[in-house]
Image: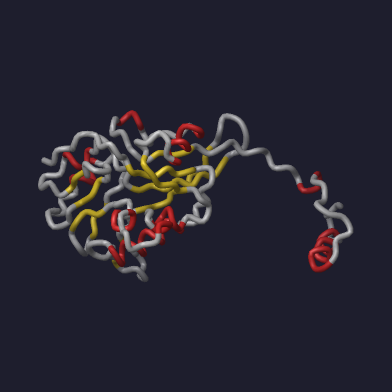
Amino acid sequence: MTQLPPPSAKKLGLVIDLDTCVGCHACVVSCKGWNTENYGAPLSDQDPYGAEPSGTFLNRVHSYEVQPEAGPAQLVHFPKSCLHCEDAPCVTVCPTGASYKRSEDGIVLVNEKDCIGCGLCAWACPYGARELDADAGVMKKCTLCVDRIYNENLPEEDCQPACVRTCPSGARHFGDLADETSEVSQLVAERGGFDLMPELGTKPVNKYLPPRPKDVAVPAQHLEPVAHNGKGFVAWLDRALSALPGRTN
């Protein structure tokens, strides 16, 4: 079985803002694209255009309807990938040592040359973050784009995970969560960032920022117009819509 290294001085991970994630799946697409082109082996798909397509993804987005104690129900988009846990059960259960945690930055990786595809790591992971690549016969997972973040040939702004670089709403943040002065640590402190299922004791490095309560929407008829006596196409459109039956100014 693989042994975990001592806690690392650097803890690289993600902070995901559930308040600003719009569920567009851009992070899923960019992750799939980058890792299919640059992973040890492409992330395969089975019957992609058939009746029952399946494939290997290192990042997924789930959507849930949540009812707060006060206020209207909210739709929360929940991105999920490997959380690079400090006490990673996927590592300690691996019979070949293929699954390991880096001592220099805390990133959890898989050495595919040693992986036998037994699936024990997927069974041990409480977050469902491991996937078996059916074509390659090995387990795959989020690497935090380790081939990007240390790549000196890339521009500085690209030396971050593909999902972070791509997110159009700025919901994903990357950095050192062991550094209290880092942007990600400050976000966690200011917004009450939390661990996913902390009761399991895995100590995930990745954190989530909770969604803010949503205000009750104000009916359109109670809103003040932004401008009076407008001109051009927008003014014409406003007059046309105002003339519709049931529309009040």
On the image, the x and y values in percent for residue 154 come to: 36, 62
On the image, the x and y values in percent for residue 6 come to: 20, 34
Residue that protrudes farthest toward the right in the picture? 229
Give the camera-side residue of 141 and 170: 170
User: Quick check: 225 left or right of 210?
Assistant: right
On the image, the x and y values in percent for residue 42 come to: 27, 65
Is 84 rendered above or below residue 232? Answer: above
User: Quick check: 237 left or right of 2?
Assistant: right
Residue depicted at 45% across the width and 45% down the height = 78
Residue depicted at 50% across the width and 33% down the height = 190
Question: Would residue 54 be visible to someone looking at this image?
Answer: no
User: Quick check: 93 left or right of 77?
Assistant: left
On the image, the x and y values in percent for residue 155 come to: 40, 61
Is 153 rendered above or below residue 1? Answer: below
Residue depicted at 39% across the width and 52% down the height = 60
Residue depicted at 53% across the width and 43% down the height = 19
Total marks in image: 0
Quadrant where the image shows the N terminus: top left
Question: Would residue 15 be visible to someone looking at this image?
Answer: yes
Is 46 rendered above or below residue 58? Answer: below
